[in-house]
Image (spheres, rainbow, N blue to C red):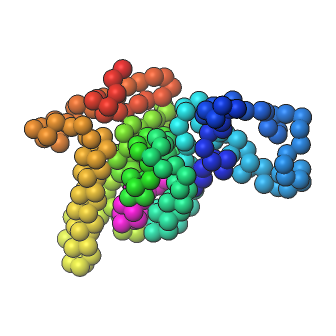
Amino acid sequence: MSANNAGELPENKSGEKTSEQSPQFPRSEALPVQSPLYWVSQKDRYLRQLLIRDIEALTGRRLIVYFSNRSNGAAIIDQKDAHYMTEVLADCKQQNVDLLIETNGGITDATEGLLSALRNSVADFRVIVARAAKSGGTIIALASAEIVMGASSELGPIDPQFQNIPAAIIIANPSADFNLKKMCENWIQQTQTLAKKCLKQGMFGFADRAKTDEENIYDCRFIIFRPYIFFTRQRHRSC
C-alpha cells in the first residue's frame, strides 16, 4: 500500500497547486538526494513514487496504491489493512482520491474496515483496476463513485470461500458438515449485505429510491474510452 511520499501536489511560487516540477533523477543529470548506491538498492520504491507523481499530475487527484501479490495465497485483505490505509490517507482529508487496486480479495470484516477508513478520510474516491480486483476487491470497487478499467482488467464474483471452495458449493453438498454449512450461509449473507450497502453508498449514491436495486443497475452506465472503460453513476457524471 503506497502513496506519493511528497504529500500533496507541489505548489508554485504563488502557493497554487501545480503538476509542474523540476525533473528529478533519473530524468535529469542531477544526482539523487539519496546516495547513488542507496537509490539503486531501493530503485523499485523510488521509481514507483515517480510514477505515482506522474499519474497524479495527469489526473489532478491523489493516487493511493493498494497492491497485493495475487500469486501468493496469503496476500489477502486482512484486519491490519484498515490501520495502514488510515495512515496513508492521513494527508488526504476531504480530497478526491484515486485508489489503484490489485487483489484477490480477503476477509469480509477486513474489507468493511478498509472501506470505513476510505469513507472517513476522503471526500470521494474512484477505483482504478489495472489487472484484477476480485471478491473483496470487487466490493471495494462497488463502493466507489467510478470504476476505471482497461481492456484486460477484471472484477469477479463476491462469493465467500472456505479453503478455496465457494461457500455455495459447500452448502449444496448434502454430505457437508452441518455447522460448516451454517457458517457458509452466514458468510454469504454478510457479503451480500455489505455489497448492497456499498452499492447504495457508492454506485447507487444518486439512485432513485422509488426503483428496485435491479432497475437502478440499468441507470448506471458503461462509458468506454479506449483503452479504458469507465463504470460510473449516471447522475454523477454524463458523457
Instruction: Say above or below: 4 vs 68.
Output: above
- In front: 17, or 213? 17
- Whole-percent x, y for residue 131 in the image: 52, 42
Q: Quadrant of the N terminus?
A: bottom right
Q: Which residues are magenta?
A: 102-115
Q: Position of residue 230 (x, y in %)?
A: 41, 30
Look at 27% across and 29% down and name the residue there.
Answer: 235
Frontmost residue, 148 versus 227: 148
Between 32 and 162, the residue placed more toward the observer is 32
Q: Residue furthest top?
A: 239
With 196 as the anchor, is 47 left or right in this view?
Answer: right
Q: Is residue 117 visible?
A: yes
Q: For the view shown, which residue lies furthest in the left direction?
A: 210
Queried whether the magenta region covers residue 178, the answer comes back as: no
User: Which residue corresponds to the image point at 37% horizontal and 25% vertical from the top-left?
Assistant: 223
Image quarter where the C terminus lies is top left
Q: Position of residue 237 (x, y in %)?
A: 34, 27
Instruction: From the top left corner, tell me how far across and down residue 118 is, in percent.
Output: 43, 53
Judged left or right of residue 152, residue 41 is right
User: Can you name the residue that lies furthest to the front here?
Assistant: 14
Q: What residue is at 56 percent from the left and 49 percent from the top? A: 65
For residue 208, above or below residue 156: above
**Nearest to the observer: residue 185 or residue 82:** 82
Q: Is residue 108 magenta?
A: yes
